[in-house]
């Protein structure tokens, strides 16, 4: 998606699944709502120049965490 440069990490590749799920929950608990496109709203969290988010599935079902540099918005 060249118009939205970002990276992601997959749950199945996480060294520690418990920490992966903890981070998803942390993003959801401490983040802010922001609209993406015309119909989607996600919860984002800014940390050290990066914006993190997942796609909105329940925490136990989440399979990825996205991130993008804040400057690339």
Image: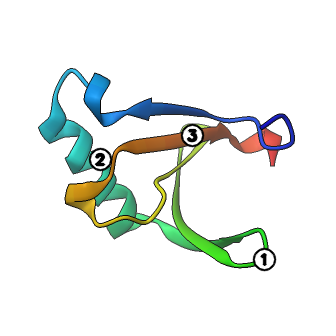
Residue at 20% over, 57% down:
60
Q: Which residue is labeled 3 in the image? A: 67
The residues bearing labels 3 and 1 have C-alpha atoms spaced at a distance of: 20 Å
Find residue 69 and report its horizontal and vertical position in percent: 69, 37
Instruction: Give the secondary structure at mark 1.
Output: loop
- Say which of 65 and 30 sits in front: 65
Give the numbered dot on residue 4.
none
Q: Residue furthest bottom?
A: 39
Badge 2 or badge 3: first in the primary sequence:
2
Mark 2 Cα within 10 Å, few/some/many (few <14, many 20+)? Answer: some
Find residue 54 and report its horizontal and vertical position in percent: 46, 54
Q: Quadrant of residue 30?
A: bottom left
The residues bearing labels 2 and 3 have C-alpha atoms spaced at a distance of: 12 Å
Give the numbered dot on residue 23.
2
Give the side of residue 71 with respect to residue 29, left or right: right
Circle count: 3
Residues at circles 3 and 1 in contact by the CB criterion of under 8 Å:
no
Q: Which residue is labeled 1 in the image? A: 38
Q: Is residue 43 above or below residue 21?
A: below
Residues at circles 2 and 1 in contact by the CB criterion of under 8 Å:
no
């Amino acid at each position: 998606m060249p118009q939205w440069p970002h990276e992601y990490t997959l749950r199945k590749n996480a060294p520690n699944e418990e920490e992966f799920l903890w981070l998803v929950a942390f993003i959801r608990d401490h983040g802010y709502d922001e609209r993406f496109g015309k119909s989607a709203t996600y919860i984002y969290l800014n940390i050290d120049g990066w914006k993190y988010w997942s796609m909105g599935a329940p925490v136990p079902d989440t399979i990825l965490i996205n991130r993008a540099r804040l400057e690339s918005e």
